[in-house]
Amino acid sequence: MSAELRSIPGVTLVMANSGSSFLGSVNAGNAYVRIAPHEGRTFSLTRLWHALWAGDPGQAFRGNYTQREMILEVRRRLKSSVTLRTAARNFPSFNIGAGNFEIDFAIRGPDLETLSAHAEQLRSQSADPGPGGRWTPRSSSTSLNSVWRSTGPAPLT
């Protein structure tokens, strides 16, 4: 996986580890992927000035990319591994105690098999963000409301 990520143009560093999380999970891993600094990958007047000074003004317009484009490329490359559940997301600038997730669900109920089936269906539906890498609302036989109705509220303790 590290070699695949390093082969992406614009990636400057990949730091990967497995089995060394807070809880020591041997079946989990993380990879930190660093891309070029913002001023080196987007058009700017400074970049244009340096390109003009070097005699190649077109250089300021070549090789520009956004962080979002890099995340989409990482997701595309990691999708080829069918045995891994992968996610690519922004590195948080600060943490206020919540997880590092763009969307987080808490699905509860008394029947674990039903909950597992619904969670797996939601996970598989979220695997395809749609055109342009953006999730769009879809009509689905399973929504959070139907998960709630089928499992019922969690008993009060």
Image (cartoon, helix red, strand yellow):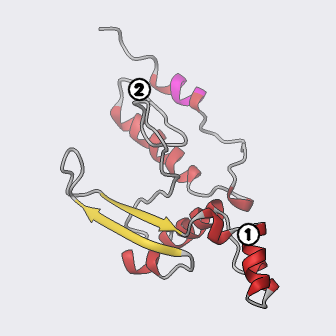
Residue 113 at x, y = what percent? 36, 37
Q: Amino acid at mark 1?
A: Thr
Q: Would you say 7 lies left or right of 143 here?
A: left
Is 118 covered by the magenta stretch? no
Q: Is residue 69 above or below residue 107?
A: below
Give the mark nearer the N terminus: 1 vs 2.
Answer: 1
Mark 2 element type: loop
In whole angstroms, how far apart are the C-alphas of marks 1 and 2? 53 Å
Dot label at residue 66: none
Instruction: Please identify the quadrant where the N terminus is shown.
Output: bottom left
Q: Amino acid at mark 2?
A: Arg
Which of 129 and 113 lies nearest the eye of the viewer?
129
Q: Residue at x 68, y 59 (%)?
A: 133
Kindly report the secondary structure that dominates the magenta region of the rendered protein. Answer: helix
Q: Residue at x 40, y 24 (%)?
A: 109
Instruction: Please identify the quadrant where the C terminus is shown.
Output: top left
Q: Which residue is mark 1?
A: 46
Residue 155 at x, y = what percent? 36, 12
Q: Which residues are magenta?
A: 145-149
Q: Which residue is mark 2?
A: 108
The local crowd at label 2, few if under 14, some if 14 to 19, many if 20 or more residues have their Cα within 10 Å, is some
Q: Residue furthest front?
A: 53
Q: Residue furthest top?
A: 157
Q: Quadrant of residue 15?
A: bottom left
Q: Is residue 80 visible?
A: no
